[in-house]
Image: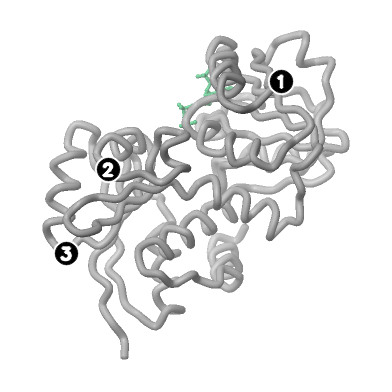
Amino acid sequence: MKKRLGNFAVIGDPVEHSLSPKIHNLFAKQHGNQIEYEKIRVAKGLFVAFVEDFFSNRGAGLNITLPLKAEAFEIADTLDEDSKSCQAVNTLKPVNGKLSGFNTDGVGFLTDLEAWHGIAVKDKRILLLGSGGAAKGIVRPLLSREPKTLVIANRTHASARALADQLNSENFIGIEGLGLDDTQLMKKRFDIIINATSAGHKNSEMPIDENFLEDAICYDLSYGPAASFFRWAESSGAKRSIDGLGMLIEQAAKSYEIWTGFSPNTESVRARIRNDLGI
Ligand code: ATR
């Protein structure tokens, strides 16, 4: 018999273009249940009041997107290892009157990269573009796969270096933090290039020169209109280019499993969403 699993939502600002309601409704259908899943724009200052109100009114789970992941990290009573390491939460679940916080971005990224695209990180030379929230969410999962080298390159050199220093002070070694215009960077070549900048959201120039693309696999954490790095790499000589839609669906699947215990089969959902978006 079909069950109503309660109310879910993705909150952020902006949030109107979120695909999460569509994705989670497809998961629920596969699960044989019904959910209410909304997208709700919540300003930073209203976050705490919103979350308290949501979970005292049949709220069964929240996804948190930009710019609220650090606020969600602060409000959670318990945290999983992934959210602790990047200090950001994208999934909240009420458990016995307390809030459990999780971060499923890293698992979503690795599942898409490894299981769906068959790409192994071990012993590869990796370039990570950007050192903001998106980069922090995937960098430790990436390092857990033991790449040969990791260079973090960012428009603002100091924050790439700060992230590299932080990682080197944990259990990782030899991570470099460079500016995008650093001559050191120009001399290097990479097997995998990951775009974690938000440049594509702003129609900005590409963060790197196309010489880097030769023989490289490119992965853009953005999808849809914002995935200009993905489209540029595809048409400018990269060996392969992958957008962030698969990661979005895989991180959502992990959230759905955390809330309901059901692990969706993402194959049909991936195909359906790509088909609906025409990408
Ligand atoms: P997110 O949480 O999505 O990563 P963020 O924390 O604001 O967002 O970080 C955005 C990242 O994109 C940063 O690394 C930013 O570089 P700066 O630290 O120099 O701001 C990078 N970025 C944004 N616009 C960019 C552009 N036009 N070219 C290159 N990098 C850009």
Q: Residue at x 76, y 23 (%)?
A: 209
Q: Residue at x 16, y 55 (%)?
A: 97
Q: What type is the residue that disc 3 sits on?
A: Arg
Q: What percent of the width, then of the height, locates residue 185?
A: 76, 16
Residue 255, picture quadrant: bottom left
Q: Residue at x 79, y 32 (%)?
A: 148
Circle 1 is placed at which residue position?
Answer: 174
- Secondary structure under tag 2 reads loop
- Note whether 270 is above or below 104 in the view shown: below
Nearest the camera: 137 or 101?
A: 101
Circle 2 is placed at which residue position?
Answer: 76
Residue 58 - label: 3
| Of the image marks 2 and 3, the number of the one nearer the N terminus | 3
256 lies left or right of 123: left
31 lies left or right of 110: left
Instruction: Count residues near mark 3 (Cα–Cα under 10 Å), then give few for <14, some for 14-19, many for 20+.
Output: few
Q: What type is the residue that disc 2 sits on?
A: Ala
Residue 212 - label: none
Q: What percent of the width, then of the height, locates residue 67?
A: 35, 34
Real-space CA distance between mark 2 and mark 3, rounded to the nearest whole angstrom: 18 Å
Q: What type is the residue that disc 1 sits on?
A: Gly
Real-space CA distance between mark 2 and mark 1, rounded to the nearest whole angstrom: 33 Å
| Of the image marks 1 and 3, the number of the one nearer the N terminus | 3
